[in-house]
Amino acid sequence: QEAILARTGDTGEEGSELYVSPDAGPRVWDALFECAGDDLRPIGLGARDTLRLEMKYALYGNDIDETTTPLEAGLGWITKLKKEAFIGLQALREQRENGVPRRLVAVVMDGRAPARHGYEVVDEAGEVVGRITSGTRSPSTGKNIALAYVPTGEHRIGCTVRVRIRHRVETGIIVKPPFVQPDTGE
């Protein structure tokens, strides 16, 4: 049976992903648990999502989508604007030249309420200026963390973010990502 082992990881944790055909999945699953015993535990997508958020890894559909650019999401390091033509190249070049209108930032909320996907980021007057793309309670830090798009100029570390949560405005602070430092194994 063919399988692909990849180290692409979307959680920031050291590990691998194993790709097998659907019919082989149950056999491989059982064999892995039989071999590993108590050293292996299944986890769900909720745990994966929390780990990737703690590392500020962008998730397509939440943090990046067809309405965002890699430059806005802080993914310019993987965007090669000197390559030959590709879809969106001209728009990215213009955005790089004219400035990015908004930025994806890491936020630690001040209060007990977590900021969730889709919540509005507002200015002092209560006008919507951005949105939360991902948010949860971080089990690693014990804090409520989130990613949000905010206007450029209000994206700097230490800036206050106001989030409308259940008809009231809660505050948070922009921090340098990641929320949790990766384990280097040392």
Image (cartoon, helix red, strand yellow):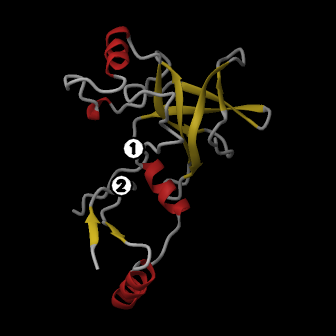
Q: Residue at x 50, y 38 (%)?
A: 63
If you read the primary sequence from the N terminus, does the residue marked by circle 2 or circle 1 appear first?
2
x%, y% of residue 16? 30, 66
Q: Is residue 163 left or right of residue 176?
A: right
User: Which of the labelled discs sits on residue 178, or is there none?
Assistant: 1
Q: Please, which residue is most extreme toward the top here?
A: 98
Quadrant in which residue 135 is drawn: top right
Q: Residue at x 61, y 38 (%)?
A: 110
Q: Residues within 10 Å of mark 2 (few under 14, many from 20)?
A: many
Circle count: 2
Q: Judge whether 101 appears above or below 38 on screen.
A: above
Question: Do the residues under discs 2 and 1 have CB atoms within 8 angstroms?
Answer: yes
User: Which of the labelled discs sits on residue 12, or is there none?
Assistant: 2
Please identify the quadrant where the C terminus is shown.
Answer: bottom left
Of circles 2 and 1, the one toward us is 2
Quadrant in which residue 78 is drawn: top left
Q: Residue at x 54, y 33 (%)?
A: 148
Task: Tell me the distance, in whole angstroms, between the alpha carbons under discs 2 and 1.
Answer: 10 Å
x%, y% of residue 35? 33, 89
Q: Residues within 10 Å of mark 1 (few under 14, many from 20)?
A: some
Q: Nearer the viewer, residue 100 or 91?
A: 91
x%, y% of residue 150? 53, 24
Q: Is residue 13 left or right of residue 144?
A: left
Q: Nearer the viewer, residue 11 or 89?
A: 89
Please identify the quadrant where the N terminus is shown.
Answer: bottom left
Q: Residue at x 36, y 83 (%)?
A: 32
x%, y% of residue 95? 37, 15
